[in-house]
Amino acid sequence: MLSRRTIFLPVLVLALLMLATPVFARFALEPRGEVTVVPIGKAATSKDYFKVGTSGLILPVVGPGEITGYAKVHFAPGDSLDKSVELRFSGVPGLPASRSLTFKQPKRGTYAGGRKGMPSGGKKIALTIPAGTHELRIDGGVVGGGELFLLLNYEGPEQPAFERQFKATEKPKPKKKPKKRKIKLGGFTLSSSSGLKFTYDDNAYKYSNDYIYSYLNGGPSEKWKFLNRVDDAIINPSLSLTGKRKFFDIGTTSITLKFSRLQYWHNPKLCNEEYRGSVRQDVGKGRSLELYYSYSPSKYLRQLNDRPPNVSDNISMTSQEFRLTRNKVVATWRHKLRKNLNLRLMMTRKLYFYNRPHLENDTWAYDWQATAYWTINKPFRLTLDYAYTDANALGIDVDGQVLDTSPASDGTYKGNKFNMELRWKPPFKQIVKDITVRAQYSVAYFSAEGCNTIGEDSYHVSRQDNMYTYQIKASRKLPYYPKISTNFGFGYAQRLVDSLMWGDIKADKNWISRTFWLGFSYKLF
């Protein structure tokens, strides 16, 4: 059995050893004199770095101990070359006289003070301080000029107190963000935005090259009755008003009213507007159901030879205005499947009514559409879209006809549409916010139901319309005007018709259009 003396002696020796060992602590090392403090990092987690000025940094320090820390340099906007730093140490024996560091252009970084540019990544510094009282001097700088920052920590004995004079700090005082004024009416929170888009279209009437050539060379005047110019400049103002209110626990209800107009500069006959109203109901997180109706009044398309409806075929045809009134009812379901994957399902009922001389062209169509939005990684998003159309366009043209068996011209068709978009958010977001490229192909197969031969309906039997659309577009916010966003781009569209018709259907239906546009949107409140 061990005696009390045997146990007491090693405990006493251990205690004496502990008392003889200096107590070390870890703390931030602060320089003496006037220094500038630069907080680096996000405001909530920033670290205070000391700027190395022309007179360097003077750090009183009692050893033995270990100095550790980081050096960083400033990269101004536009700096792309690596930066070299020469650090010099003096006042403490045994330290290296200097140390060279190289800093590469940073990909990210911020200052809590909000200064422009970015701090570099940190280069580690480690210095062993011998026993005794020292006055460490660190100076040097960026080769070629620039700002150098140091963050220093010390692990060693307690340091003597001295007066510290911090010349300046870039850490801003927290500013209270002004509360946005909300406009309310009848329990709805209102918001409104406006838009203005300028478009140049080199083929406003969507005529074929054959028709354009004929027009430019003095061809039949009746067909170009209202054509003032082949190309045109289009002004497209728009205005929307949205009210939001939470009627149900499942989510917010939004009601939107929107108006837009297409104003053609040289061909005012083509001017048209659209009125739209929608109701959208959020259904939990990441899901919503929207219903909207849009109406476009009678729009002029072109001159077309026809006779009034319900008259004999013996009545000769005359040149008539071919006009279209559009009605659409759309139901849309949006669903966020995953963090980077969203789905949209749409069902559309189109009711296109032509003016009375062209009743046989009226169209009742259903569209079913599915769209997937896949964020591949942070800067890239891929959009894939497919739509199927089933359109009935059989009408009455001659007295005594019945709609179901009418032999009138029948534009009934079924179609497919394939669309793909790739959006890229580039690193130079100060210049452009995002860039999107788009490619779309759609095809319509005309069946001319009730017609057996091409002679019975030469414009529709065996006909296939192919549409090709390509776009590249970009958007950005205007500098100094954050409420104004702008978008601009180029588009190319082409229709190619395949048919067994022996007439001039391709000369009538084929066309190419090139557009350039610049648009602005502004949030009113």
Image: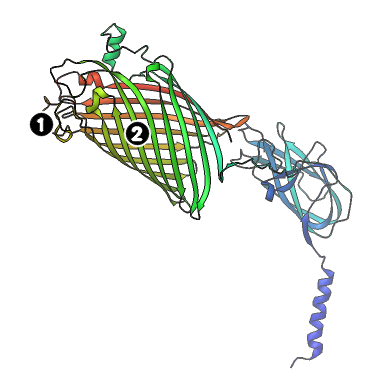
Q: Residue 180 is drawn in which quadrant?
A: top right
Disc 1 and disc 2: Cα gap in Å? 31 Å
Figure disc tally: 2
Q: Residues within 10 Å of mark 2 (few under 14, many from 20)?
A: some
* Image quarter (top left, top right, bottom left or bottom right) of the N terminus: bottom right
Q: Work out whether residue 43 or residue 36 is closer to the camera in this orientation and state it.
A: 43
Q: Which residue is mark 2?
A: 327
Badge 2 marks a residue whose secondary structure is: strand
* Image quarter (top left, top right, bottom left or bottom right) of the C terminus: top right
Inspect this view and state whether residue 377 appears.
Answer: yes
Left or right: 505 in relation to 477:
left
* Residue type beneath disc 2: Asn
Query: Residue 340's x, y, as percent?
Result: 45, 48
Q: Which residue is mark 1?
A: 452
Residue displayed at 22% across by 34% down:
413
Q: Residues within 10 Å of mark 1 (few under 14, many from 20)?
A: few
Q: Earlier in the sequence, mark 1 or mark 2?
A: 2
Q: Work out whether residue 53 or residue 297 is closer to the camera in this orientation and state it.
A: 297
